[in-house]
Image (spheres, rainbow, N blue to C red):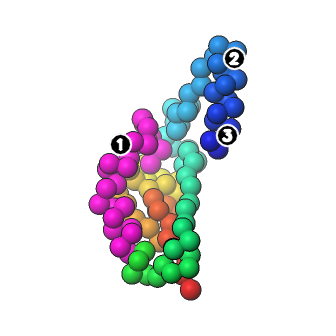
Amino acid sequence: MWVARYLLQRLCEKYKVDVNYHCKPLGATDWNGSGMHSNFSTKYMREVGGKEYFEKLMGAFDKYKNEHIAVYGPDNHMRLTGLHETQSIDKFNYGLSNRGARSACPTTS
């Protein structure tokens, strides 16, 4: 994604056009599509992890959810509506196979 954005930005500069990374470019808020999300894991999560570790990690994310949203860019309230498999912008939850969660907790063995 970062490489694609970089290439798009360079092409836009060359042809003197602007790119807009708006999360809902058509302005509609009642249509499916979360506007991109990413999952992550670390070696520690995969090899050590455990339920207690994940609970603590997700608690830390929850504590700072508003600070995280503040740096994700403008208009995320249009993307995070609580509809169409997205979480509401003012809530934080997580879980296994929870497509509406703001964070997904990987399975542990």
- Residue 74 lies, in percent from the top left, at 42, 35
What amino acid is found at the position of numbered circle 2 in the picture? Lys
Give the quarter of the figure containing the N terminus.
Answer: top right
Q: Quadrant of residue 60?
A: bottom left
- Specify the principal SS of the magenta part: helix
Which residue was labeled with disc 3?
A: 3
What amino acid is found at the position of numbered circle 3 in the picture? Val
Crowding at dot 2, Cα within 10 Å, few <14 / some 14-19 / many 20+, comes out as few
Disc 3/disc 1 C-alpha distance (Å): 24 Å
Residue 61 in the image: above or below residue 18: below
The residue lying at 39 percent from left, 68 percent from top is: 58
Which residue was labeled with disc 2?
A: 14
Which residue was labeled with disc 1?
A: 70
The residue lying at 44 percent from left, 48 percent from top is: 80
Q: Does 28 appear in magenta?
A: no
The residues colored magenta run 55-80
Residue 11 lies left or right of residue 75; in this view the side is right
